[in-house]
Image: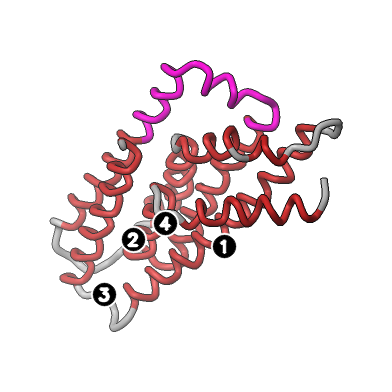
Amino acid sequence: MTAQTLLLFGLTVFPLVCTPGPDILFVASQGLTGGRGAVWRANAGILSGYCVHALLAAFGIAALITAWPPLFHAIRWAGLAYLLYLAVQMFRSAMQPGALALQGAATQRLFVRGFITSLLNPKGLLIYLSILPNFIQPGEAVALQALLLSSIFIGSCAVVYGLIGHSAARLAQRGGISDGKRRLAEASAGSLLLLAAGKLAA
């Protein structure tokens, strides 16, 4: 596989990485409510989910999931239900008065939430199945090529999602977070997750 092929793949998937979706909106919502630490925990979970997608694509299991529509749609609707659950949790928190204070256990669960969010997001599987195969060179190790291309996609996600999350955290931290600002931020985060659920449903 040539460097030109890798560069072309990176340029092809980069606009898709930047397109707002459940993962970006989830990271942004955590930046608004939890700061930079929450951003990177959520981001690490999301990237881990995409690593699972990469392994599935490399060994051909993802093709089986897509070939059987009921299973694919089950994954899609499970992701939708989980995003709605997260949005409800945000709105419930926004309705409670009090200063911004994240508990350690809740913060630690951000990794798991991010992992589930990306694992149940068909976007990754669709990228691996509709775009990645076009860059595979015949006659070479297919699994190795798939993993190499997947690493470019995952690396791009790490950079883009990190920048977006940090920007959201910086906005939330300007002037401190009063009770009113905290509740507004969490309501905004819930709205972002509802938007993500709507995009997934569509």
Q: Is 89 located above or below residue 144 in the figure?
A: below
Q: Nearer the viewer, residue 15 or 141?
A: 15
Instruction: Using residue 88 as the reference point, say whether residue 37 is left or right of it.
Output: right
Residue linked to disc 4: 27
Where residue 148 sits in the image (x, y, percent)? Answer: 74, 45
The range drawn in magenta is 57-79
Q: Of the residues under marks 4 and 2, which one precedes in the sequence?
A: 4
Q: Position of residue 144 (x, y in %)?
A: 78, 37
- In the picture of the structure, the residue carrying the numbered disc 2 is 102
Kindly identify which residue carries mark 3.
177
Distance (Cα) linking label 1 and label 3: 26 Å
Report the Cα–Cα distance between label 1 and label 2: 25 Å
Q: Earlier in the sequence, mark 1 or mark 3?
A: 1
Picture layout, residue 123 above or below residue 57: below
Kindly check if marks 3 and 4 are in contact, taking CB atoms under 8 A apart as contact.
no
How far is disc 4 from disc 1 in space, using C-alphas? 12 Å
- Verify CB contact (< 8 Å) between mark 4 and mark 1: no
SS class of the residue under badge 4?
helix
Q: Is residue 92 left or right of residue 105?
A: left
Three-letter residue code for mark 1: Val
Magenta-span inclusion, residue 68: yes
Amino acid on which disc 3 is placed:
Ile
